[in-house]
C-alpha cells in the first residue's frame, strides 16, 4: 500500500522508491475485512474496482453482523453508511429514538439500506437515483491482505518502484544524527535511503529493533492477545458482510471471499488454552478445511511514535488493535495519507513529525474506544466477559456513553473515523439505551415522525428488492478495463 500510494503521489518528483520484501518471512493474510475509506484509496490510485475484485477474489462488505455478542441468541447489525435523513433539522437518531423508546419504531436495521441489503444477501454500488437510499450506498471489501499486497506490488512496479527480494539482516544508524543510514541485506548489499518506511510487521525491524521507540501495551482495555485462523471452503454463496460471533473467551470471525471463507477465533490466552481455542473454532465451521489452523500472538497497542527520526512505521509495525471492526488496513491508509501530508525533506522537521504522530495517536485512541465499548457493554456471562465488564473505560468513551445515555446524543468529533450510524447501531445493539430522548424532538408532530419513518422503511425495502444478489453482482461484473 505504501509503495503504491507513494509511487502514485510522488510521481514526477524524482523520488526513487525501493521495496524490500523477504520471500521467506510470510506476511499476515488471514482474510481481511476493510471499511469504506479503502474505496477512496483504490479510487485515488486509479485502480478499476471490478478488476481488483476479480483479481484478488474479493467480495463486498456492507457492515458487520454481531451474533450472541450482547447476549446468547441476540443479533444486531453494524451497517456502513449514514443514518436516515433529518426531519426539519432534527437528526434521524433523535426522532427515531423517541419512537423507539415508546415502542413505536422498527429496529434500526430497517432504516439502513446497508443492513437491509446485507441480511438479504444483496449488493449494488450506489446508483444515481436522487432522494432514494440507493444514492448513498456505502461499502467496503473483504479480501486477503497478501493478495491485495501482491496486486499493489504490480501496480507499484509499473510506476517505477524497484522491488528487491531479500531479507534485511542489519540496520546502520548514523552516529551523529541518529538517522537510519542503510539496511544490509542477506547477500551483503547495503541499501541507503533518506526515508525508511518500516512495514516489517509485528517485530518492527527498524522502528523498534533498531530505534527502540517503545510500545504502549493496551491489554488493560483489549484483553485478546491471540488468534487461531483457518480457511474453509464456502458452503454457500458469500454474504456481503462480516459475521462475528461471541465465544467464551473472545469472538469468532467469518470473512467470506469468492473462493473461501477466512475464519478465526480471537481470544484471550488468560482464559482459554490454544488447543481449546482451536477446537472451538473447528467445531464451529462448516465446509471442508484445506489446511490446518495456525495461531498468531499479538500485544494490543501501538508504537509510542509511528514516526521516529527518518523511519515511519506502517501496519503491524505501528501497532495492532484486534480486527473486530476491521481497522488495521484503514490505519495503514491513514498513515500513508498523513505521510504525504507532512512529507519531509532531508531536514525532517520536528513539527511535521510531531503532528504526524499526534494524528495517528488520536486515530488509534478512537479505534480503541470503539472496540472497548463492544467489550464493556455486554450481558454475557463467564469469566472472560465478567473480566471485560470490570475493565476501566477511558474518559473519552465514558463521555460518549454518558451523552448517549442522557439524551441519545452522539457527537462526531471532526474527522472522527466512525460516523453517527456506527455509534448508534453498536450502542443500541449492545443495549445502551438512553434514559430520555432529545427534548427538541417534541417540536415535531408524532404523526410526521411516524410518516417519515414508514416512508424511509418502505423506500429501503423497495430499493433492496431492486438490487441483485451479492454473488450475481460479482459474477456479472463487467470485463477488464485498461489500467490508468
Ligand atoms: C489475526 C489477524 C486478523 C486481522 N484481520 C484484519 C481485518 O479484518 N482487517 C484489517 O484491516 N486488518 C486485519 N489484520 C491486520 C492486517 O492483516 C495487517 O494490517 C496487514 O496484513 C498488513 O500487515 P503488515 O504488512 O504490516 O505486516 P505483515 O503482513 O506481517 O508483513 C510483514 C512484511 O515484512 C516483511 N519482512 C519482515 N521482516 C523482514 C526482513 N528482515 N527483511 C525483509 N522483509 C521482511 C515480510 O516478508 C512481510 O512481507 C489482521 C491481523 C491479524 C493478526
Image (cartoon, rainbow, N blue to C red):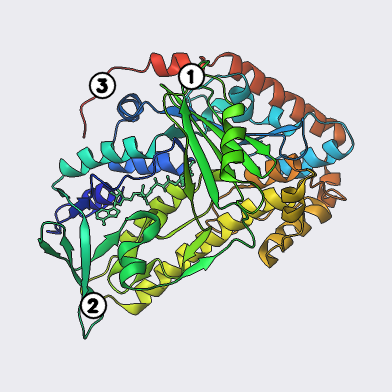
Q: Earlier in the sequence, mark 2 or mark 1?
A: 1
Locate residue 479 relative to residue 256 in the image: left or right: left
How far across and down, in percent of the image, does residue 52 sit? 32, 30
Question: What is the quadrant of residue 211 in the picture?
Answer: bottom left
* Vertical comparison of 15 with 477: above or below: below
- Dot 1 surroundings within 10 Å: few (below 14), some, or many (20 or more)? few
Horizontally, is 76 left or right of 282 in the view?
A: right
Distance between the alpha carbons at the discs numbered 2 and 1: 55 Å
Residue indicated by mark 2: 347
Taking the spot 25% from the left edge, 64% from the top edge, the residue there is: 196
Q: Secondary structure at mark 1?
A: loop
Dot 2: few (<14), some (14–19), or many (≥20) neighbours within 10 Å?
few
The answer to whether marks 2 and 3 mark residues whose Cβ atoms lie closer than 8 Å is no
SS of the residue under disc 3? loop
Q: Could you say where residue 322 lies in the image, as x and y percent from the top left?
A: 54, 49
Q: Nearer the viewer, mark 1 or mark 3?
A: 1
**Mark number for residue 480?**
3
| Residue at x-position 21% and y-position 66% | 170
> Which quadrant of the figure contains the C terminus?
top left
Query: Toward the viewer: 31 or 8?
Result: 31
Q: What residue would you read off at disc 1?
A: 288
233 or 144: nearer the eye?
233
Q: CA distance from mark 1 to mark 3?
A: 31 Å
N-term-proximal mark, 2 vs 3? 2
Amino acid at each position: 500500500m505504501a509503495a503504491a500510494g507513494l509511487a502514485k503521489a510522488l510521481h514526477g518528483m524524482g523520488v526513487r522508491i525501493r521495496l524490500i520484501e523477504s520471500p521467506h518471512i510470510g506476511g499476515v493474510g488471514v482474510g481481511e475485512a476493510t471499511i469504506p475509506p479503502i474505496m477512496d484509496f483504490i479510487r485515488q490510485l486509479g485502480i478499476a474496482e471490478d478488476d481488483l475484485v476479480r483479481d484478488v477474489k474479493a467480495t463486498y462488505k456492507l457492515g458487520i453482523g454481531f451474533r450472541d455478542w450482547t447476549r446468547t441468541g441476540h443479533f444486531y447489525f453494524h451497517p456502513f453508511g449514514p443514518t436516515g435523513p433529518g426531519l426539519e433539522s432534527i437528526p434521524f437518531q433523535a426522532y427515531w429514538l423517541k419512537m423507539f423508546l415508546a415502542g413505536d419504531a422498527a429496529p434500526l436495521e430497517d432504516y439502513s439500506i446497508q443492513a437491509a441489503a446485507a441480511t438479504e444477501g444483496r449488493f449494488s454500488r450506489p446508483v444515481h437515483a436522487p432522494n432514494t437510499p440507493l444514492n448513498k450506498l456505502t461499502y467496503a471489501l473483504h479480501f486477503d491482505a497478501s493478495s491485495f499486497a501482491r496486486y499493489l506490488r504490480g501496480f507499484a512496479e509499473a510506476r517505477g518502484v524497484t522491488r528487491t527480494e531479500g531479507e534485511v539482516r542489519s540496520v546502520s544508524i548514523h552516529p551523529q544524527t541518529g538517522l537510519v543510514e542503510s539496511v544490509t541485506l542477506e547477500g551483503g548489499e547495503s541499501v541507503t535511503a533518506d526515508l525508511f518506511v518500516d512495514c516489517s510487521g509485528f517485530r518492527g525491524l527498524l522502528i523498534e529493533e533498531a530505534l527502540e521507540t517503545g510500545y504502549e501495551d493496551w491489554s488493560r482495555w483489549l484483553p485478546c492477545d491471540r488468534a487461531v485462523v483457518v480457511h474453509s471452503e464456502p458452503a454457500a454463496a458469500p454474504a456481503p458482510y462480516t459475521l462475528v460471533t461471541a465465544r467464551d473467551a473472545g469472538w469468532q470471525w467469518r470473512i467470506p471471499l469468492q473462493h473461501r471463507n477466512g475464519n478465526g477465533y480471537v481470544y484471550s490466552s488468560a482464559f482459554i488454552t490454544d488447543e481449546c481455542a482451536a477446537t472451538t473454532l473447528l467445531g464451529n465451521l462448516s465446509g471442508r478445511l484445506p489446511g490446518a489452523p495456525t495461531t498468531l500472538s499479538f500485544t494490543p497497542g501501538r508504537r509510542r511514535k509511528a514516526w521516529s527520526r527518518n523511519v515511519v512505521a506502517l501496519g503491524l509495525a505501528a501497532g495492532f488493535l484486534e480486527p473486530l471492526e476491521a481497522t488495521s488496513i484503514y490505519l495503514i491508509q491513514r498513515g500513508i495519507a498523513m505521510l504525504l501530508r507532512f512529507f519531509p525533506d532531508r531536514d525532517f522537521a520536528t513539527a511535521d513529525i510531531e503532528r504526524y504522530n499526534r494524528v495517528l495517536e488520536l486515530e488509534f485512541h478512537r479505534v480503541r474506544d470503539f472496540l472497548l465499548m463492544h467489550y464493556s457493554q455486554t450481558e454475557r456471562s463467564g469469566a472472560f466477559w465478567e473480566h471485560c465488564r470490570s475493565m476501566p473505560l477511558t474518559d473519552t468513551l465514558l463521555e460518549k456513553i454518558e451523552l448517549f445515555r442522557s439524551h441519545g446524543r452522539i457527537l462526531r468529533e471532526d474527522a472522527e473515523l466512525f460516523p453517527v450510524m456506527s455509534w448508534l447501531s453498536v450502542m443500541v445493539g449492545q443495549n445502551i439505551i438512553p434514559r430520555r430522548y432529545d427534548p427538541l424532538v417534541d417540536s415535531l408532530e408524532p404523526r410526521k415522525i411516524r410518516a417519515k419513518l414508514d416512508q424511509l422503511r418502505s423506500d429501503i425495502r423497495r430499493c433492496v428488492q431492486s438490487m441483485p444478489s451479492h454473488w450475481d453482482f460479482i459474477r456479472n461484473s463487467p470485463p477488464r478495463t485498461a489500467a490508468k
